[in-house]
Image (cartoon, grey):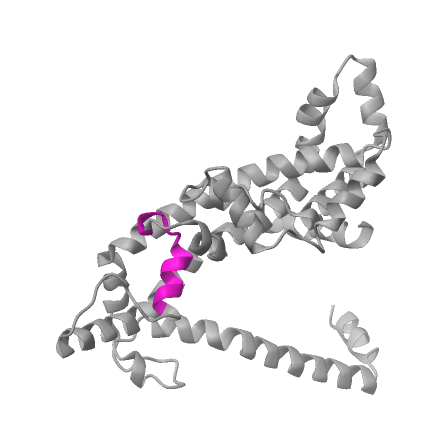
Amino acid sequence: MANAKTKRAIRHTFSDRVFLTVDFIILLLLLIIIAYPLLYIFFASFNAQVTKMGLSLIPEKWSLQGYNAIFEYKYIWSGYWNSIVYTIVGTIINLLVTICCAYPLSRKDFKGRGFVMVLCMITMYFNGGLIPTYLVVKDLGLLNSIWSIVLPGAMSTYNMIVMRTYFDTQIPAELLESAQLDGCGNINFLRSIVLPLSVPILAVVGLFYAVSHWNSYFNAMIYLTDRSQYPLQVILREILITNTLDPTETSTDIIAQQGMEERKNVMKYSLIIVASLPVLILYPFIQRYFVKGIMIGAIKG
C-alpha cells in the first residue's frame, strides 16, 4: 500500500506540483471571496450592533433581535406565504407549458417543428416591451392577482430547448414504436413513459423556474397594488434598498424615527437569511439530478 502511494507521488513532476499548488491557491482565494460575504451576513444576523460590526465576522454582542423583529413584522409573513404560493403555482404552470411545447418539438414526425422552433427562439431576443405587456395584462383583467405574476412568463425558451434536447436524445424512438404497436396514444406515451424517464431534466428545469419565481420582484411591483399580495422579495427590497418598513407609516417623532432605523438595521441581515432558506433547503434534494440534467442540455443542445 505504501509502495503504491510512493509510486503515485513520484509520477508528479515539478511542473505538475507547481500547477497543483497554483491551482490550490486560486481555488482557496475563490472560496474566501465567495464564503466571506455569506458568513458575514450569517453572523451579522445575530449581531445586536450591526453598524459597529465593521469587517469582523464575530459579533461583539450576540442577539436574536433581528429575528424577533422579523417575527413581529406582519408583512414578512404575508410576503413569505405569497412567495410560496407564487413559486408553487408558477412552477407547476411553467412545467406544464414547457412540456407541452418541448415534447412535440422533439418528435421528428412533427411537421413544421423547424418553423415553430424559429418562432420560439425569436422570443429570446425580442419582446413586446413593458408597456404593451402591461396593457395586455390589464385588458385581460389580471392586474392585482396571482395570474399577473405566474402567466406572463409561463415558459422560458431556453428551458424549453434544454427539455426538448433531453426528450430528443434520451428517449429512444423504439419506445414510441413499441408503444404504438400496443395501442398507446401520444398523450399516454408522454404521461406513462416519457415523463417517468425524464425526472432529471424535470427536476433541473423545475428548480430553475422555482428559483426565478422566488427571487422575482419586478412583476409584483408592476402588476400588484395591494400590499397584502406582495411577495417576500418586494418586502425585502423595501427594507434593503428603499430603507423603509411601511411607506404608509410616517412619523415626525425623532425618537420614533431612530427606533425604526435601528429596527431596520437589525432586520436586514436576518431577513436575507430567512429569505434564502427555502432555496438552500431545496437544492440538496435534487442535487443528484442537477448535474446530469444540465450537462445533457449543455453538451447536446
Q: Is residue 237 visible?
A: yes
Against 132, residue 55 (above or below) is: below
Name the residue rendered at 15%, 79% in the picture. 254
Q: Quadrant of residue 96?
A: top right
Which portion, as a residue range, is magenta?
227-239
The answer to whether 247 is drawn above or below residue 143 in the figure is: below
Left or right of 80 on screen, residue 65: left
As for residue 220 lying within the magenta part, the answer is no
Q: Residue at x 81, y 32 (%)?
A: 107
Q: Residue at x 59, y 44 (%)?
A: 206
- How many numbered dots are placed on residues in this image? 0
Q: Pick the residue in front: 178 or 261.
A: 261
Q: Can residue 279 be seen in this snapshot?
A: no
Q: Main secondary structure of the magenta part?
A: helix
Looking at the picture, how far across and down is residue 228, in whole percent? Answer: 31, 48
Q: In x, y percent, where is residue 243?
A: 33, 71
